[in-house]
Image (cartoon, rainbow, N blue to C red):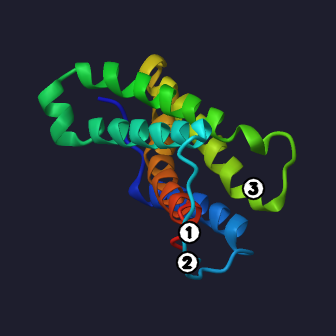
């Protein structure tokens, strides 16, 4: 049996990741922004929406009940969906690479965290050494939860809800 990380370590990592994200958005007050404008012809935003849907589908596949029903096939679906979600997020953030401003820090953090999740997922999937598996397991779960909360905030800001 593979060793499981302690709940305290997982909770501290989760809180630390949220603290980093919080420090990147602290300059932006939570206020009602009013009307929301979305250019339906802006393909890059639709790629971001597709990435969010892929990330959500990947998260659903991680549910214990879904895993039990799919057996070993869940990972064969979960991993490619996660990689595709990361690629879509990278395409979606294409404008942030040229000029990096403080307002972009949180978006770039989300992209980096998503890339880290893909990396840790690959470690869980392909590294069979139990010494390393425990560390990949420690970082993958809390990072996924932190990314989910950061994405919810990102979407609410970008849709002018907050």
Q: Which residue is mark 1?
A: 160
Provide residue 55's location: percent of width, then percent of height. 42, 39
Name which of mark 1 and mark 3 comes first in the sequence: 3
CA gap, disc 1 to disc 3? 18 Å
Q: Earlier in the sequence, mark 2 or mark 1?
A: 2
Residue at figure coordinates x 77%, y 45% from the top left: 96
* Name of the residue lying farthest toward the right: 99
Residue 26 lies, with reference to residue 156, above or below; the image says: below
Front residue (pair 78, 87): 87
Q: Is residue 128 visible?
A: no
In this rendering, position of residue 127 left or right of residue 44: left
Q: Are marks 1 and 3 in contact (CB under 8 Å)?
A: no
Q: Pointer 3: what residue?
A: 105
Which one is in front in this view, the residue at disc 2 or the one at disc 3?
Answer: 2
Residue at (60, 35) in percent of width and height: 115
Q: Residues within 10 Å of mark 1 (few under 14, many from 20)?
A: some
- Pick whichever of labels 2 and 3 is earlier in the sequence: 2
User: Callout 3 environment at 10 Å: few (<14), some (14 to 19), or many (20+)?
Assistant: some
For the residue labelled by badge 1, is the local secondary structure a helix, a strand or a loop? loop
Q: Position of residue 11 (x, y in %)?
A: 46, 61
Label 2 element class: loop
- The image shows residue 120, relative to residue 93, as above or below, that is above
Residue linked to disc 2:
34
Residue 143 horizontal/vertical position (percent): 51, 48
Q: Is residue 77 above or below residue 150?
A: above
Residue at 57 percent across and 40 percent down: it is 41
Estimate the spatial distance between the alpha carbons at disc 2 and disc 1, rounded to whole Å: 6 Å
Q: Secondary structure at mark 3?
A: helix
Q: Is residue 68 left or right of residue 2?
A: left
Give yes or no for contact between labels 2 and 1 (Cβ–Cβ under 8 Å).
yes
Which image quarter is the C terminus in?
A: bottom right
Please state, as top left, top right, bottom left or bottom right, where the N terminus lies in the image: top left
């Amino acid at each position: 049996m593979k060793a499981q990380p302690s709940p305290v370590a997982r909770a501290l990592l989760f809180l630390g990741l949220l603290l980093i994200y919080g420090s990147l958005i602290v300059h932006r007050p939570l206020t009602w922004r009013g009307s929301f404008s979305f250019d339906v012809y802006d393909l890059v935003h639709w790629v971001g929406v597709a990435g969010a849907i892929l990330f959500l589908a990947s998260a659903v596949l991680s549910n214990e009940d879904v895993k039990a029903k799919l057996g070993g096939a869940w990972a064969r679906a979960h991993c490619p969906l996660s990689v595709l979600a990361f690629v879509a997020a990278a395409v979606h953030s294409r404008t942030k690479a040229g000029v990096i401003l403080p307002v972009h820090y949180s978006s770039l953090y989300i992209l980096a965290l998503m890339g880290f999740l893909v990396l840790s997922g690959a470690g869980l999937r392909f590294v069979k050494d139990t010494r390393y598996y425990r560390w990949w397991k420690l970082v993958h779960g809390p990072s996924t939860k932190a990314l989910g909360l950061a994405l919810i905030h990102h979407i609410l800001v970008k849709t002018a809800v907050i």
